[in-house]
């Protein structure tokens, strides 16, 4: 069995959960509470973990030797005790964790099914990658609503390949989701250091415990992220790699400056609330993406580099949006914008871009001289289940970007017929600092059959309306008018 086969087998276990009355959004959480116990045991027994992270009462063999009501009661008690663990990461993973299973036979069936999987085969690719595959499968099922937390793997891998994280660098994701960016960065570094064996013990300890930090607002998503990190050998500090908190509130202001920031901030009306309340940001805005962008370029060390996924409205929004883009281009060299195809995100029909920039200084002005724009949106296929979004679509962009991670490789302007062009800072200033730049005529025409699902269209419209409402409220506040809701 390969990892895809095992992921499908795990996903099929959701039928068991459905029979016990567990709803769609709780499938994966319920499954991974049990799956993590199995994976932790397999990793510890094979030496991939230095020692067992779970106490003996919560290890896999303790579950397999019980049955019936004794099993269900022991499992419930184990989850409760794990939430009170002296190990802060384990207690965070199992915080408020409780099984919704009511039938002992369903728990027995899940345990037997997990035991029947060829775990030796799974270990060849790593149990962490298997877990990541399950999260991706969950995100692809739009009914679960998990797509907002999951960035497509080919996009993450391409960004990592271009940013080239190095051992010893500090790397942050202020909207961590299930930690895909941080894990991909760690995988890249491990692949370039013989799984860290090229490093000293001190350097290895730094990579495991201090190289990465993320912040996640939603506690259930953070649980998935902490499990994901541990299964990939990333332990972090006493809060784990992923901290629980609102980056756009006080916790975000306490994150230290880092060498690299990689992120896909939540679109529009992301669940969980968490509007901007930061007082240390220069420009006040109700637009979450603009607030995240400020956090990111302010949070880089001088010489640091970033890649951030942002919707189109960040590129053209007037008023405070133009102020923030101007500030970004002063403090940083915004060297590259990648216009992404539509339809590549699982739960949103928004049009997105990746902004690549390197920090000069918080006191700098005029740091951006030219912005290179690569249009991967015009005349592209309609991505979906019939046309999957794969790494091959990034090959031409990666070649055009060049070898140097800060975007300073020699580049060629491909002209009006090409996908890669350079625009100087003066020309951008004449357009009110709008970075929504396109020149290729898109020959694709959408008919009714090509449109996204109605629920996706409605969600996109709600996001745009919410952003507009936030801006109007900001204008009223600036005018000293009371906002009546």
Image (cartoon, rainbow, N blue to C red):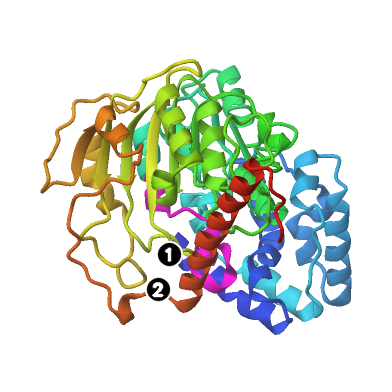
- Disc 2 is placed on an element classified as loop
The dot on residue 11 is none
Kindly identify which residue carries mark 2. Answer: 452
Is residue 205 depicted above or below 248 in this figure?
above
- Disc 1 is placed on an element classified as loop
**Which quadrant does the N terminus fall into?**
bottom left
Residue 90, image x, y percentages = 77, 45
The answer to which quarter of the image holds residue 214 is top right
* Badge 2: residue crowd in 10 Å (few <14, some 14–19, many ≥20): few
Taking the image as shown, residue 449 lies to the left or right of residue 311, namely left
Kindly identify which residue carries mark 1. Answer: 349
**Which quadrant does the C terminus fall into?**
bottom right
Which of 185 and 117 lies nearest the eye of the viewer?
A: 185
Please tell me whether residue 136 belongs to the stretch shown in magenta: yes
Q: Earlier in the sequence, mark 2 or mark 1?
A: 1
Residue 343, image x, y percentages = 37, 64
Is residue 97 depicted above or below 437 in this figure?
below
- Residues at discs 2 and 1 in contact (Cβ within 8 Å): yes
Measured in 3D between alpha carbons, the distance from the residue under mark 2 to the one under mark 1, in whole angstroms, is: 7 Å
Q: Residue at x 49, y 57 (%)?
A: 121
State whether the magenta stretch is mostly helix, strand or loop: helix
Taking the image as shown, residue 370 lies to the left or right of residue 110, namely left
Residue 250 shows in this picture: yes
Residue 118 shows in this picture: no
Which of 59 and 138 lies nearest the eye of the viewer?
A: 138
Which of 297 and 26 lies nearest the eye of the viewer?
A: 297
Q: Which residues are magenta?
A: 134-157
Residue 52, image x, y percentages = 73, 43
Q: Residue at x 19, y 41 (%)?
A: 420
Please tell me whether residue 381 belongs to the stretch shown in magenta: no
């Amino acid at each position: 069995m390969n990892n895809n086969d095992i992921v499908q087998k795990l996903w099929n276990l959701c039928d068991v959960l459905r029979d016990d009355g567990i709803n769609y959004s709780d499938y994966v959480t319920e499954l991974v509470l049990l799956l993590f116990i199995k994976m932790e045991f397999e990793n510890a027994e094979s030496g991939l973990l230095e020692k067992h992270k779970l106490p003996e009462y919560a290890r896999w063999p303790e579950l397999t030797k019980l049955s019936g009501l004794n099993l269900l009661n022991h499992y419930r008690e184990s989850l409760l005790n794990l939430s009170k663990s002296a190990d802060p990461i384990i207690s965070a993973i199992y915080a408020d964790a409780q099984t919704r299973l009511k039938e002992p036979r369903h728990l027995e069936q899940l345990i037997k099914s997990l035991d029947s999987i060829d775990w030796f085969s799974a270990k060849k690719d790593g149990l962490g990658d298997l877990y990541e595959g399950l999260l991706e499968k969950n995100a692809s099922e739009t009914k679960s609503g998990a797509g907002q937390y999951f960035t497509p793997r080919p996009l993450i891998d391409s960004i990592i390949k271009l940013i080239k994280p190095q051992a010893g660098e500090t790397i942050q994701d202020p909207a961590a989701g299930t930690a895909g960016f941080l894990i991909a960065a760690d995988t890249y570094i491990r692949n370039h250091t013989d799984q860290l064996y090229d490093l000293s013990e001190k350097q290895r300890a730094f990579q495991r415990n201090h190289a990465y930090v993320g912040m996640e607002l939603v506690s259930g998503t953070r649980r998935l992220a902490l499990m994901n990190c541990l299964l990939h050998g990333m332990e972090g500090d006493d809060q784990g790699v992923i901290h629980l908190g609102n980056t756009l509130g006080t916790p975000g202001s306490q994150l230290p400056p880092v060498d690299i920031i990689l992120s896909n901030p939540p679109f529009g009306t992301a669940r969980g609330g968490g509007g901007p309340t930061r007082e240390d940001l220069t420009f006040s805005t109700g637009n979450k993406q603009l607030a995240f962008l400020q956090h990111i370029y302010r949070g880089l060390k001088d010489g640091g580099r970033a890649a951030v996924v942002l919707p189109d409205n960040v590129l053209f929004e007037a008023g405070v949006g133009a102020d923030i883009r101007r500030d970004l281009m002063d403090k940083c060299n915004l060297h590259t914008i990648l216009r992404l195809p539509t339809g590549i995100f699982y739960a949103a029909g928004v049009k997105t871009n990746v902004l690549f920039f390197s920090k000069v200084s918080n006191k700098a002005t005029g740091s951006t001289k030219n912005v290179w724009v690569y249009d991967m949106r015009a005349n592209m296929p309609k991505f979906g289940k019939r046309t999957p979004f794969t790494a091959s679509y990034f090959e031409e962009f990666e070649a055009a970007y060049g070898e140097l991670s800060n975007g300073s490789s020699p580049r060629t302007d491909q002209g009006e017929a090409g996908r890669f062009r350079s625009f100087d800072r003066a020309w951008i200033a004449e357009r009110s600092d709008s970075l929504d730049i396109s020149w290729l005529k898109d020959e694709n025409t959408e008919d009714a059959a090509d449109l996204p699902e109605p629920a996706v269209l409605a969600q996109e419209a709600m996001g745009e309306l919410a952003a507009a409402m936030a801006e109007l409220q900001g204008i009223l506040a600036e005018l000293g008018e009371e906002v009546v809701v």
